[in-house]
Amino acid sequence: MLADMIFGLLALSPQEGGGTLLDVNPGLIVWTVITFVLLLLILRKVAWKPILSALDQRETTIKESLEKAEQAKQDAIQILKQNEANLARAEEESQKIIEQSRQYAEKLKEQMLQASKTQAQKIVEDASAEIERKNEAAFDELKAQIAGIAVDAAERILKENINPELNKKLVNNYINEITKN
Amino acid sequence: MNNITDTLAIADTIVSVKKTDSGWIMHHIMDSRAIELPFFGEVHIPQFPLLFGIDLTPTKHVVFMWLSALLVLLVFATVASKYKKSIVPRGIANFFEVFILFVKDEIAKPTIGKGYEKFLPYLLTAFFFILFGNFLGLVPYSSTFTSNIAITATLAALTFVVTQVGGMMQNGIWGYIRGLMPHGIPWWMMPIMIPVEFLGLFTKPFALAIRLFANMLAGHTVILALIGLIFFLGTWVVAPLSVAFALFIYLLEILVALIQAYIFTMLSSLFIGMAVHQEH
């Protein structure tokens, strides 16, 4: 009986109170066309246009945001590189400046040392020259005094050169005089 | 009302017809002038006046078609209003966006290619109309209007019209007709090729109509047959097996409902693509 039933279905045999499964009701065609076309027109206006445009808009927004983010990333990398380069240059510069100033200080030190050395030398030389000069002057004065004394003594000897005794007395006196002086 | 839950109704029907008759299955699958409602019994639809000799009385399938159309309209009006508030989809909009994007990116874009946007409203409407109809048919007391040959044939005919008009708008009427012939056919082949290509135009929508109709019909028929087995054999013994199998078929039908909506849309899109870009 099941086989009978299925066979009945497959053969699409006419049934009681109705046609077969392949019967086409013209009214249904009309209603389907009306329903579907109306649905299509209303949905196109009410749903598909706003939804699809929203989706498109979102797609472009996402794409643009991604592109912007990528651009920003590239910019940041660029800036970072620049900063690094600047930093390296600054480091180099400061190193150079330090080196230069060190050299300069070294030179200055050397110079000052040299200058003070020569100055000291000069002072020493000056001082020794002065001493020499003073010595000489003193010696000259002494020599002049001795010469004067000798001349004086000779004068006196010549004046009173009467006897040896007196000579002797004179010399003694003179010597005494000198020592007294 | 093709569902396992209304076994009582089936039992009633079986009592009223001969035991060996398959008429009760037909009664549940086929269109009728009456709608069965829970607790209310049958509601008979009043006769409409004839228009140009066509009986325009809405049948059960027409009512469920309207219900499905109304549901589609409500759902997508809601979805559209959600997009007006925020570009980020939430809830129902998020759920249906998956399907919309599927039809757009997986069906229309690869099969039609350039200029697919023009056909999106038709494809989306067809997809959701059929999808909602298929799923509505799985609800107890409801009827599957996509298992009616008149309706599926009309839908296929609409695809045919969209295909031809789309092809003609893209290539010009004469250019489209010439483009139907494959290139490099010797002139003496024409008497054979012209009828073949002409027939080929109509076999495509014919296949569309039959595929949807048969697929949506088959699952329901098998479920009814399995449940009917209990009453035919008049024993409880087969009931667990019958119900288990019917449940399995029912789950399969959920899958089929999705797949058939997809197939119909996919093939429509493919035919449109072939008509619009004839060089392929």
Image: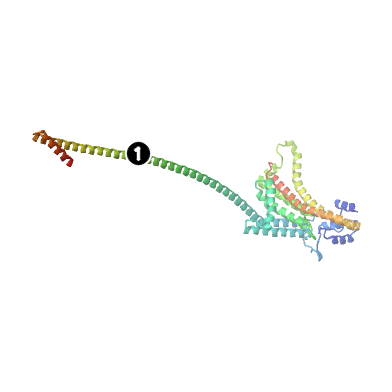
Callout 1 amino acid: Gln
The N terminus of chain B appears in which quarter of the rendering? bottom right
User: Which residue: 55% across, 48% down?
Assistant: A72
Q: In this rendering, is residue B56 above or below A74?
A: below
**Chain letter behind tag 1:** A
Q: Please, what secondary structure does the residue beneath circle 1 have?
A: helix
> Left or right: where does residue A24 sit relative to residue A152?
right
Instruction: Specify whether B198 is left or right of A18.
Output: left
Pick the front one: B173 or A173 = A173
Other-residue count near label 1 (Cα within 10 Å), few / some / many at <14 / 14–19 / ≥20: few
Q: Quadrant of the C terminus of chain B?
A: top right
Number of disc labels: 1
x 69%, y 48%: residue: B106
Is A165 placed above or below A70 here?
above
Q: Is residue B190 something one can see in this rendering?
A: yes
Frontmost residue, B180 versus A170: A170
* Residue A42 visible (yes or no): no
The residue tagged 1 is A114
Taking B42 as reference, is A78 left or right?
A: left
Q: What colouring style does the render use?
A: rainbow
Q: Residue furthest bottom?
A: B40
Q: Position of residue A75 (x, y in %)?
A: 53, 47
Query: Residue at coordinates 75% horizontally, 46% vertically from top-left?
Result: B204
Q: Position of residue B140 (x, y in %)?
A: 80, 60
Q: Position of residue A157 (x, y in %)?
A: 11, 35
Residue B265 or residue B31, whichever sits in front: B265
Give the quarter of the image for residue B226.
bottom right
Residue at the farthest front position: A165
Q: Position of residue B22 (x, y in %)?
A: 87, 55
